[in-house]
Amino acid sequence: MPTIGVALAIPEPWATQLQDYRTAIGDLTAQEIPTHITLVPPLPVEHAALGAIEAHLEQVARQVQAFPVHLRGTGSFRPVSPVIFVALAEGISACEALADAVRQGPLAHDLAFPYHPHVTVAHHLDDALLDQAFEELASFECEFLVSGFHLYCHEHGAGWKPTRGFTLAAQAGVGQP
């Protein structure tokens, strides 16, 4: 039974910058996790369901327009979870709406925590390293247009790999002559 996830990939150069930071601070899970904003957390599914899942994701992508995201500063889920993240200053409601749409139909499931779009930069490290990540990335900032999302599959020993991309509908006036 494969384990899948659905996420927004962070574009370059910021994806590599944040992933390299995460690895350098000692969070070795970053080697198997592309830098992303989660829409659907890890979810085991039947192989037979993958076609319906992909069809559902295609339909969602056709109905959602591209949207801007502005990442700025850091946040934390402590004490509930030992996570430091880069926060969204813009794009929160668009990510929430997209995540809600994606988590319908064959991907409908209950979440362990309320949905909060973010980019994890330190996870399951000791408090001193979590504090360090919180402080060192407090001034991090970037902006980009989200034009699609990916279906990821977890491969034992290789980590999370994108298996298919889904392009969002064009935003009026964006990318049009």
Image (tube, rainbow, N blue to C red):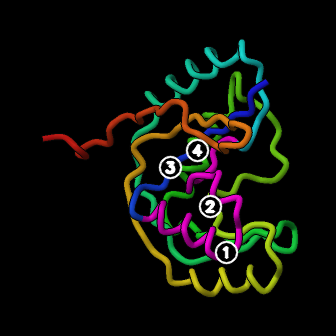
Q: Earlier in the sequence, mark 2 or mark 1?
A: 1
Q: How many marks?
A: 4
In this view of the protein, which residue sits in the foreground, 105 or 126?
Answer: 126
Look at label 1 and name its amino acid.
Answer: Gly
Q: Residue furthest top?
A: 48
Q: Which residue is mark 2?
A: 118
Cβ–Cβ below 8 Å for labels 2 and 1? yes
Q: Residue 157 location in percent, x, y?
A: 71, 43
Q: Secondary structure at mark 4?
A: strand
Q: Which residue is mark 4?
A: 7
Tell me how far mark 3 sits from mark 1, CA to CA: 19 Å
Give the residue displayed 50% in from the left and 24% down from the top: 58
Q: Check disc 2: other Cα within 10 Å, few if <14, some if 14-19, many if 20+.
A: many
- Indicate yes or no whether the magenta region holds residue 22: yes
Residue that mark 1 sits on: 75
Query: Dot 3 corresponds to which residue?
Result: 9
Q: Are the residues flagged by discs 3 and 4 in contact, CB closer than 8 Å?
A: yes
Q: Nearer the viewer, mark 3 or mark 1?
A: 3
Front residue of 10/24: it is: 24
For residue 158, side relative to residue 163 (left or right): right
